Image: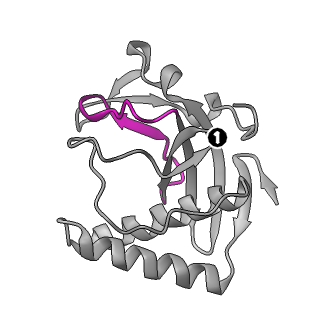
């Protein structure tokens, strides 16, 4: 199904259960055990799982902690030797945001999705080289971030 923002997918009950299980395991290995972080882990994995399905690759089911700070974050998926960071939000006005101080030089592409379980919408994606340029820095009240608004994101997931 398609809407003006992008491609919509409806998860099956089994897919939602898998996402719930992976999110819980990831949450338990994380230092931040706040209840809202569990929801973010769940929403995040839904995005990863859908993009993996869309690109016909297996999702990363590992639950270890990844960190930009210590260099262990290599994105969520690797496709055609490109590292992809899947950014998923529940905010319908959400957009790709990468904190300037913690940008990840290991990432080749960022993909943006909006989740409203059981539905998820693929909005678009952008290369890290294009996103992480000074002209894309904006300040929204929590420090400078690289961002490109949704209407400027290319939507063709196969043109890398």
Question: Magenta-highlighted stretch: main secondary structure?
Answer: loop
**Residue 77 on the magenta segment:** no
Q: Is residue 99 above or below residue 131?
A: below
**Residue 107 on the magenta segment:** yes
Q: Is residue 62 above or below residue 51?
A: below
What segment carries the magenta color? Answer: 90-108
Q: Which residue is mark 1?
A: 124
Q: Is residue 63 above or below residue 52?
A: below
Locate residue 10 relative to residue 79 in the image: left or right.
right
**Image point 30% across, 54% down: which residue?**
66
For this orientation, the residue located farthest to the top is 135
Q: Secondary structure at mark 1?
A: strand
The location of residue 48, given as percent across then percent down, is: 54, 59
Q: Count the marks: how many? A: 1
Q: Say which quarter of the image contains residue 23.
A: bottom left
**Image point 26% across, 76% down: which residue?**
28
Task: Depth check: give the residue in front, 41 or 77.
Answer: 77
The location of residue 16, given as percent across then percent down, is: 57, 80
């Amino acid at each position: 199904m398609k809407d003006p923002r992008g491609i919509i997918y409806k998860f099956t009950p089994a897919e939602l259960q898998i996402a719930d299980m992976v999110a819980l395991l990831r949450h338990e290995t994380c230092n931040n055990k706040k209840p809202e972080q569990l929801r973010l882990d769940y929403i995040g994995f839904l995005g990863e799982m859908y993009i993996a399905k869309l690109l016909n690759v297996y999702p990363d089911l590992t639950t270890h902690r990844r960190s930009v700070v210590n260099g262990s974050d290599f994105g969520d998926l690797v496709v055609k030797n490109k590292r992809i960071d899947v950014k998923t939000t529940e905010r319908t006005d959400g957009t790709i945001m990468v904190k300037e101080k913690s940008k990840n030089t290991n990432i080749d592409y960022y993909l943006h999705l909006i989740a409203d379980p059981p539905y998820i919408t693929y909005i678009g994606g952008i290369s890290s080289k294009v996103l992480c340029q000074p002209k894309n820095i904006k300040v929204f009240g929590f420090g400078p971030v690289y961002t490109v608004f949704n209407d400027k994101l290319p939507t063709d997931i196969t043109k890398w």
